[in-house]
Image (cartoon, helix red, strand yellow):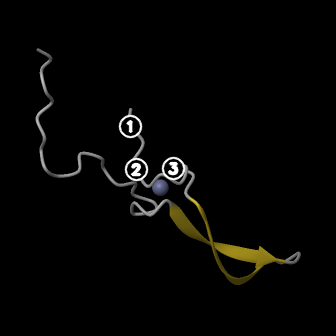
Amino acid sequence: MPAKKPRTGKSAVPKCKPCKGTGEVSRTVRVGRKHRPVGEQTGMCLSCFGTGHAPTE
Ligand SMILES: [Zn+2]
């Protein structure tokens, strides 16, 4: 019979640090030649590509 993987009960997937596991990060939006900040915009986290999971090595 196949061996079952033991269940730990807690999530084994570490959260992505830059986005805190949300998959999205807020970044400052700049406009104009002087790059004046006009606010923040939420974008996909480039560290985990929106999954919210820390990249595994
Ligand atoms: Zn992330």
For badge 1, the amino acid type reads Thr
Look at label 3 and name its amino acid: Ser
Give the residue at mark 1.
56
How far apart are labels 1 and 2 at the CA level?
8 Å
Name the outermost residue toward the bottom: 38
What residue do we see at 40% from left, 54% from top? 16
Q: Note whether ligand 1 is within 8 Å of mark 3.
A: yes
For the residues carrying marks 2 and 3, which lies nearer the camera in this image? 2
SS label for mark 3: loop
Residue at disc 1, secondary structure? loop
x%, y% of residue 54?
A: 39, 48
Pinpoint residue 5: horizontal percent, then vertical percent. 15, 30
Which image quadrant: the N terminus? top left
* Residue, disc 3: 47
* Image quarter of residue 56: top left
Labels 1 & 2 near each other (Cβ < 8 A): yes
Q: Residue furthest top?
A: 1
- On the rendered structure, is 49 left or right of 21? right
Q: Which residue is mark 2?
A: 53
Q: Where on the picture, by quarter, is residue 35? A: bottom right
2 or 3: tag closer to the N-terminus: 3
